[in-house]
Structure formats: structure tokens, C-alpha cells
Image (cartoon, rainbow, N blue to C red):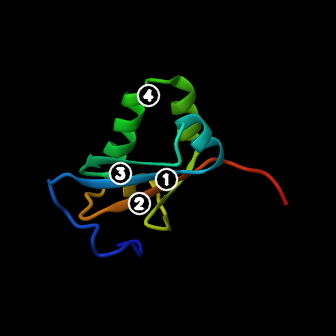
Amino acid sequence: MNGFPIRMEHTDLMTTVRIRYWAGAKAVAGTATEEVEAATPREALAEVGRHRNDPSFDRVIGACSILIDGHAAHDADLDRPVVGVVEVELLPPFAGG
């Protein structure tokens, strides 16, 4: 199961998804965190995108690496139904050293 917590089980119920934005994602979102009700992380991300209706937001978020409860998420992980409060972190590309 990809090392994710047990609480990521199949369900058709909506649950709280806490989205945490970092760096450029935080700047374009205009907030550090927000919560939405959704059945999957992908639905939560779609909801915050619809709420903003901003191509800049979509572009930055589309380039982000995603963590779900502290674990690197792959595309299929975004469609896994969640149970309980789940934290999705959006980390935009960065450079430095």
C-alpha cells in the first residue's frame, strides 16, 4: 500500500483535507493552509482550484511536489479515498544549495 497510513481506506464519505502551501505555492494561494471537505486529495485540490479560478494558481500548483501525510505522493495516490483528517502539502520546485 505504498507505505501510507492505514487511514487511507476506501470510503465514499467526504472528509477533511488540510492543504498546506509552501513558498511560491503559499504566495499564489494567499494563505499558508486551508481545509476542504473531499473524498480524495485530487478532489480537494480541484476544489481549491475552482474556488480561485486563477491560471497562475493552477500553473504553480501543477508544478508542485505533493506530500500526503508526510509521504511523497504519486499520481495514483491522489485518487485514494481518505478517512479522517489528511494533510496534503504542496511544495513548488526550488533551487539552492
**As displayed, is residue 71 above or below residue 28?**
below
Earlier-in-chain disc, 1 versus 4: 1
The kind of secondary structure element at disc 3 is helix
Earlier-in-chain disc, 3 versus 1: 1
Going 37% across and 29% down the picture, which residue do you hit?
50
Nearer to us in this view, 30 or 89: 30
The kind of secondary structure element at disc 2 is strand
Q: Amino acid at mark 1?
A: Arg
The kind of secondary structure element at disc 1 is strand
Task: Say which residue label 4 marks.
Answer: 52
Indicate which disc residue 41 carries. 3
Going 35% across and 61% down the picture, which residue do you hit?
86
| Comparing labels 3 and 1, the label whose residue is closer to the camera | 1
Compared across the picture, whether 28 is left or right of 79 comes to: right
Indicate which disc residue 36 carries. none
Earlier-in-chain disc, 2 versus 4: 4
| CA separation in Å, label 1 and label 4 | 16 Å
Residue 84 horizontal/vertical position (percent) = 25, 65
Where, quadrant-wise, is the N terminus in this rendering?
A: bottom left
Q: Amino acid at mark 3?
A: Pro
Task: Say which residue label 1 marks.
Answer: 20
